Amino acid sequence: MIRRSSLERQLRETRASLLEMGSLAERAISRAMQALAVGDLALAQSVIDDDQGINRLRYQIEGQCDVLIATQQPMAGDLREVVTTLSLVSELERIADHAKGIARLTLRLDRLPRPTDLAGLPTLADEVRQSVRRALDAYVTRDTELAYAVVRQDDAIDHRYQAIFEALIQFMAADPAMLTPATYLLWVAHNLERIGDRATNLAERVVFLVTGKLMERESQPAANPSTAV
């Protein structure tokens, strides 16, 4: 009983650390896009600087998992949770890296002519950030339906990314003077699209956590009209 109590305490601590990391990654996306929208170089630099703290938290969580495995020897569902946690923190760290990439592009855009229209990038950012949030909510509630909805949403994110890509290419063709800044915005869009992919990976790992089965995109359940995104 004492050992089980200790295991549950360590699992709770690890969950709390993971959710803290998820909150920081979400915040990094929001702040990076805010910096891009208004050209706030100080804010962009703070996103870059804060990434080290997110990296340290990842290593801390991995250390917690190592200690938990070594001292508690978790089995079955508990072991699956530890394995899932290691995957989730890796994805969250990469999400934060993509936010940092957007912040770096904001610095590169300094003193360049800026398009007055960000070609749908803020909307794409809202969608991918929502996907990250919903994947984390699915983790907290162990809600596989919500996790599957996040996976399905990735198609809509990909379509929006493609529309932004095509719009920016047309923009560059119409005004060659905007070639460099528009190229940077293409890179921003790519970072956002990759965040969407990482959110999908988070959701797929939640399905594994709950069911013990690794899902493939093609094997996901069809959308239920009552739960479709």
Image (spheres, helix red, strand yellow):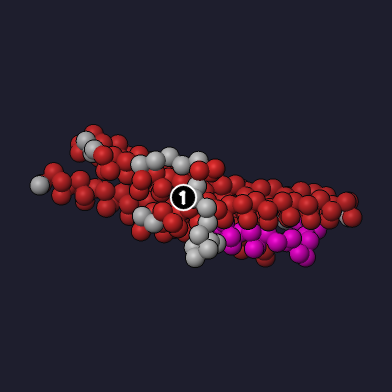
In what element is the residue under mark 1? helix
**Residue at x-position 21% and y-position 49%:** 8
Q: Is residue 164 above or below residue 60?
A: below
Q: In this view of the protein, which residue sits in the foreground, 208 or 100?
A: 208
Q: Position of residue 150 (x, y in %)?
A: 51, 55
Q: Residues within 10 Å of mark 1 (few under 14, many from 20)?
A: many
Q: Which residue is mark 1?
A: 203
Q: From this viewpoint, which residue is outermost toward the left? A: 1
The answer to whether any part of residue 25 appears in the image is no
Taking 133 as reference, is 16 left or right? left
Q: In this view of the protein, which residue sits in the foreground, 206 or 19?
A: 206
Q: Position of residue 11 (x, y in %)?
A: 26, 48
User: Which residues fall within the magenta stretch?
Assistant: 111-132
> Where, by quadrant of the figure, is residue 60 drawn?
top left
Q: In this view of the protein, which residue sits in the foreground, 147 or 173?
A: 147
Q: Is residue 198 above or below residue 67?
A: below
**Residue at x-position 32% and y-position 41%:** 80
